[in-house]
Amino acid sequence: MWGISTNWDKILSGSNVNYGNITYVLMYNLGLEFGNALGLATDSAAQMANWFARVTGLSMFLAYTGAFFTLIYSPLKAIVQGTAAYWPKRMSKINKFGMPEFAMWMQCLLVVIIVLIVSFGGKSASAFYNTLTLMANVSMTLPYVFLAFAFPFFKNREGLERPFVVYKTKAITYIVTFIVVAIVGFSNIFTIIEPAMSGNYSDTIWMVVGPVFFAIIAMAIYENYHIRQRKLKK
């Protein structure tokens, strides 16, 4: 519906549109065009557009509220608690409720700062948010390529308990692995090169910088762990 109702160059080219509010902009435009298609007056069509955006906002609020607690804790559980040895002790310290309190406060502080910058920082802040989104685009999906690629090697390991097995033959395992790696891999490749083909080289650069930047951070944390281990042995 968005595709057939939106003039992409006109609607999305405004300086007030970013990756954070694009859903509401598109839904508002959908409501406006739908009202016009029904032959409503200008004010009525605008009112319908407002309701489209409001209902979308309410539905997203309810959905995000349900996922809120999971989104708060799951990244910390996977990144911090899953690799507790690599972080400073304070980051992985568990409080009496079984939660990494300090890490959660640090995460909260970072999110609040980003939200405040985007909300009150004007055009430059909106560009900053768009840049963060571009950096995360490939970074969020690239690990799945490595996970899928490692799956056949995991299947070949012996001595592991496998109470539930979906792919029972090597052929099916390799086929599924190839499909997943090809789809996700080529999606990332085309996501990166598509802006450059349109002359928007900065977006392509930021999407390449994202995985490199986060990889450098991970390597720094890993190296810091080994430095601390060597000091303890001395």
Image: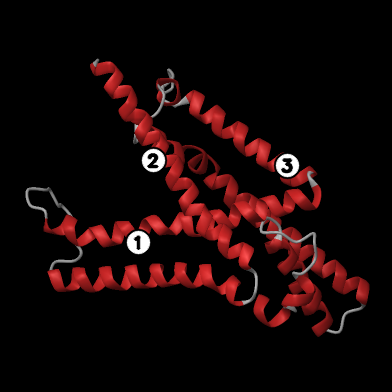
Q: Are marks 1 and 2 in contact (CB under 8 Å)?
A: no
- In screen coordinates, is 180 left or right of 19? left
* Circle 2: element type: helix
Q: Are marks 3 and 2 in contact (CB under 8 Å)?
A: no
C-alpha span from label 1 to label 3: 33 Å
Residue occupied by mark 3:
117
Query: Residue 219 bears which disc, if any?
Result: 2
* Circle 3: element type: helix
Check disc 2: other Cα within 10 Å, few if <14, some if 14-19, many if 20+: few
Vertical comparison of 161 with 96: above or below: below
Q: Position of residue 92 (x, y in %)?
A: 41, 26
Residue in the foreground of this view, choosing between 189 and 161: 189
* Circle 1: element type: helix
Q: Position of residue 189 (x, y in %)?
A: 46, 70
Q: Quadrant of the N terminus?
A: bottom right
Residue at 11% over, 53% down: 157
Q: Position of residue 146 (x, y in %)?
A: 32, 58
Query: Please, what is the three-letter code of the amino acid marked with disc 3?
Result: Ile
Sequence order check: which comes first, mark 3 or mark 2? 3
Residue occupied by mark 1:
145
Check disc 1: other Cα within 10 Å, few if <14, some if 14-19, many if 20+: some
- In screen coordinates, is 205 left or right of 93? right
Query: Please, what is the three-letter code of the amino acid marked with disc 1?
Result: Val
